[in-house]
Image (cartoon, helix red, strand yellow):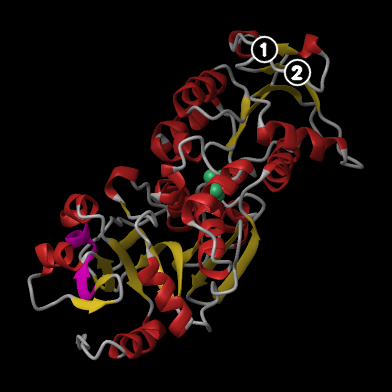
């Protein structure tokens, strides 16, 4: 039976208003906000002023409100709101990936203890219904890998820089204007935002709770004209791709790195703010989900779907977590890597004979473990180097491109 939801909403910014618009256009579903908690009372609002409050306790301490929707920007405030709501036996919908990823264990325990539900479809890949798909459809299948594009802003920037010759800064500003980027866009371009999403998917897909601080993330901040030349000459493209993979030893490898991919790669034509998730299972093999990963309406629509699910008391069962075998994070596997930057900076890490001189700098191809990258990350950042994984099918075109400089480093 459908349950009456009395909703307290936190946040009426880009996603909050997107949700309101999606709800207003919903033919069958009606949900009324009892109170909306906002940070800036001076802003002009499209709804009756009476609905708004700046005091979070007006919602949290109201016993008639049984559902909290948390759509604010600040993960610390969001943590208080979400945990206090759960402790007061309110079901919660949140779109806050950082909050969820950093407190998974505690949030699971609060749900169990207070018999409530915290659902967060909108926190991962906007309009792609990936979490419920993993929870419901792949609940029994042994998955082998999940990868894709989980950040709309960085994909938007990469598309504009490579395909439309725009400047990195201009594209970033545009992503901010369109409401895709985080308030601190370093979270997007530095690969933190997709890492939080990867950590959340790791729980639903593999039943493992990863700590964000243990998962490598490198971003796209240091892309330069070298990568643009690679694209113009060889069509190889950069995508920021989080990846989680089950290793032959049964453990899990997870990281976020830009990746050089060729024209036949399933992510090659995923452009602008679009996200994609590639799920691979032992029996189902590879499946690709595509959708808008950022923006008011796609995210609002994911929140609406979660609200609607709460009408039927929907809960994630976390089957893979509660029945999981002992698996842990393993960063030892080696991957093929591409580094670029100032030639003398590359030499500081790789020595004098490894860097190939190209137009506007140097390139090194290497094969190293994820742990090696983690160990050298501070140095890589300090030297403003760009690092990317090389997808298998990109290796030959990349080597051909380097031949142009008649100095091929043979990767063994
Ligand atoms: N900043 C995020 C992105 C918003 O660009 O994907 C959606 O999570």
Q: How many C-alpha atoms fall within 10 Å of the one at disc 1: few (<14), some, or many (≥20)?
A: few
Q: Is residue 54 above or below residue 166?
A: above
Q: Which residue is mark 1?
A: 41
Q: Is residue 5 above or below residue 277?
A: above
Magenta stretch: residue 368 in it?
A: yes
Magenta stretch: residue 115 in it?
A: no
**Image x and y of residue 337, in percent:** 27, 72
In the image, the segment drawn in magenta is 363-373
Closer to the camera in the image, 295 or 208 = 295
Q: Is residue 245 above or below residue 321?
A: below
Look at the magenta stretch and give its main secondary structure.
strand
**Image x and y of residue 96, in percent:** 53, 36
Q: Is residue 359 above or below residue 400?
A: above
The residue lying at 65 percent from left, 8 percent from top is 58
Q: Which mark is residue 44?
A: 2
Circle 2: element type: loop
């Amino acid at each position: 039976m459908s349950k009456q939801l009395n909703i307290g909403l936190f946040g009426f910014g880009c996603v909050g208003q997107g949700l309101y618009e999606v709800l207003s256009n919903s033919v069958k579903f009606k949900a009324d906000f009892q109170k909306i908690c906002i940070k800036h009372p001076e802003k002009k609002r499209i709804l009756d002023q009476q609905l708004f409050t700046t005091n979070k306790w007006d919602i949290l301490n109201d016993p008639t409100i049984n559902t909290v929707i948390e759509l604010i920007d600040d993960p610390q405030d969001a943590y208080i709101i979400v945990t206090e709501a759960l402790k007061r036996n309110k079901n919660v919908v949140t779109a806050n990936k950082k909050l969820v990823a950093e407190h998974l264990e505690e949030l699971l325990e609060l749900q169990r203890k207070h018999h409530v539900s915290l659902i967060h479809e909108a926190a991962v890949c906007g309009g792609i219904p990936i979490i419920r798909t993993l929870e419901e459809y792949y609940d029994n299948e042994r998955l082998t890998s999940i990868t894709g594009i989980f950040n709309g802003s960085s994909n938007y920037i990469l598309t504009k820089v490579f395909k439309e010759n725009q400047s990195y800064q201009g594209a970033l500003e545009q992503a901010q204007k369109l409401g895709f980027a985080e308030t601190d866009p370093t979270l997007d371009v530095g690969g933190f935002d997709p890492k939080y999403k990867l950590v959340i998917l790791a729980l639903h897909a593999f039943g493992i709770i990863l700590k964000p601080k243990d998962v490598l993330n490198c971003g796209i901040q240091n892309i330069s004209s070298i990568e643009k030349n690679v694209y113009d000459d060889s069509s190889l493209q950069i995508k920021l791709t989080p990846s989680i993979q089950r290793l032959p030893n049964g453990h899990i490898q997870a990281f976020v790195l830009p990746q050089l991919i060729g024209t036949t790669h399933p992510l090659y034509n995923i452009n602008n703010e679009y996200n994609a998730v590639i799920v691979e299972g032992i029996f189902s093999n590879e499946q690709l989900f595509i959708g808008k990963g950022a923006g008011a309406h796609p995210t609002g629509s994911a929140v609406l779907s979660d609200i609607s699910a709460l009408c039927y008391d929907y809960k994630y069962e976390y089957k893979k977590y509660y029945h999981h075998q002992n698996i842990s994070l393993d960063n030892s596997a080696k991957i093929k890597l591409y580094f670029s930057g100032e030639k003398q900076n590359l030499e500081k890490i790789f020595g004098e004979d490894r860097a190939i001189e190209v137009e506007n700098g140097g390139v090194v191809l290497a094969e190293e473990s994820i742990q090696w990258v983690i160990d050298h990350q501070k140095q890589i950042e300090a030297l403003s180097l760009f690092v990317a994984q090389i997808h298998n099918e990109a290796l030959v075109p990349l080597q051909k491109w380097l031949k142009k400089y008649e100095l091929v480093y043979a990767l063994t």
